[in-house]
Amino acid sequence: MHIEPELVSPEKMLLAYGTAAAAGAMTVKFATDAVGERGAASLAARTVLASAAVFTFFEIFPHFPVGISEVHFILGSTLLLVFGAAPAAIGLAIGLLLQGLFFAPFDLPQYFANVTTLVAPLVAIKFLADRIIAPGTAYVDLRYGQALALSTTYQGGVVVWVGFWALYGQGFGAENLTSIVTFGGAYMLVVLLEPLVDLAVLAGAKLARGLAKTGLVTPRLYA
């Protein structure tokens, strides 16, 4: 997941430092909470697993260019539900960095914009999950409507941020607007798949309740 090189000029990229810092501040808050829940070792282990998952999403899962960016199956809500907010957010940042360092160095100048694009919607669905999922409900007992709401919010957030960077960098010309609409329409197709993936993963987790004792998943998955 990235915006195209030079879509945002270097002097305008300063804004991305601020947006990424804000997303990072929320991630630190989530990480502090996670350490309090299960300890630093659990947070580290879940972060490693989330980073590996994100790298897989970027480099192994199908992806194709559309309009101003690429369509990837970045399963943000799945990461949140399995690993928790902090590991998911850190994993997205690490996976994106690994992609840039080893496979797409031309993406590195846009790194902070891309981090914002992926992590800010994750922050949004963390607050949405807290609102629409009752405190006594384990994630493995999620309903389809709840999974759909989380997926739609995450993927919609990604589209909004990519569109924002495109408008911020290139303005409101007809060609740019067309590219944004084309990308957004294609990317939202992920919403058709992600809730089903979420429910399939959660159904598998129900059969492996021993994971609750390992520290490799978020406590909320079963509790």
Image: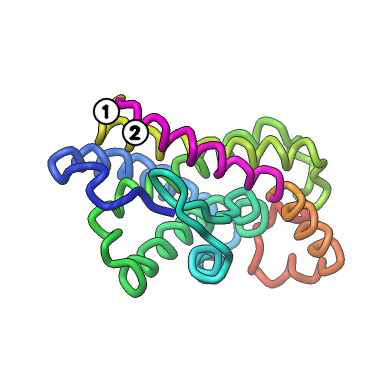
Relative height, residue 174 to residue 108 (above, below): above
Relative image position of residue 161 (x, y in whole percent): 41, 37
Answer whether labels 1 and 2 touch (C-beta < 8 Å): yes
Q: Is residue 44 visible?
A: no
Q: Residues within 10 Å of mark 1 (few under 14, many from 20)?
A: few
Whether residue 218 sits left or right of residue 162 in the image: it is right
Relative height, residue 120 to residue 73 (above, below): above
**Secondary structure found at label 2:** helix
Q: Nearer the viewer, mark 1 or mark 2?
A: 2
Amino acid type of the residue tagged 2 in the rendering: Asn
Picture quadrant where residue 25 is located: top left
Magenta includes 177?
yes
Relative image position of residue 92 (x, y in whole percent): 46, 57
Colour scheme of the rendered structure: rainbow
Picture quadrant where residue 136 is located: top right
- Which sits earlier in the primary sequence, circle 1 or circle 2? 1
Q: Is residue 108 visible?
A: yes
What residue appears at the point 46 percent right and 48 percent down from the top-left corner? 66
What residue appears at the point 57 percent right and 35 percent down from the top-left corner? 127
Closer to us: 12 or 41:
12
**Secondary structure found at label 1:** loop
- Magenta stretch: give its range: 173-193
Q: Residues within 10 Å of mark 2 (few under 14, many from 20)?
A: some
Whether residue 122 sits left or right of residue 22 in the image: it is right
What residue appears at the point 23 percent right and 55 percent down from the top-left corner? 109
Q: Which residue is mark 1?
A: 171
Amino acid type of the residue tagged 1 in the rendering: Gly
Q: Which residue is mark 2?
A: 176
Picture quadrant where residue 65 is located: bottom left
Magenta includes 166?
no
Majority secondary structure of the magenta segment? Answer: helix
Looking at this rendering, what residue extends furthest in the left direction?
11
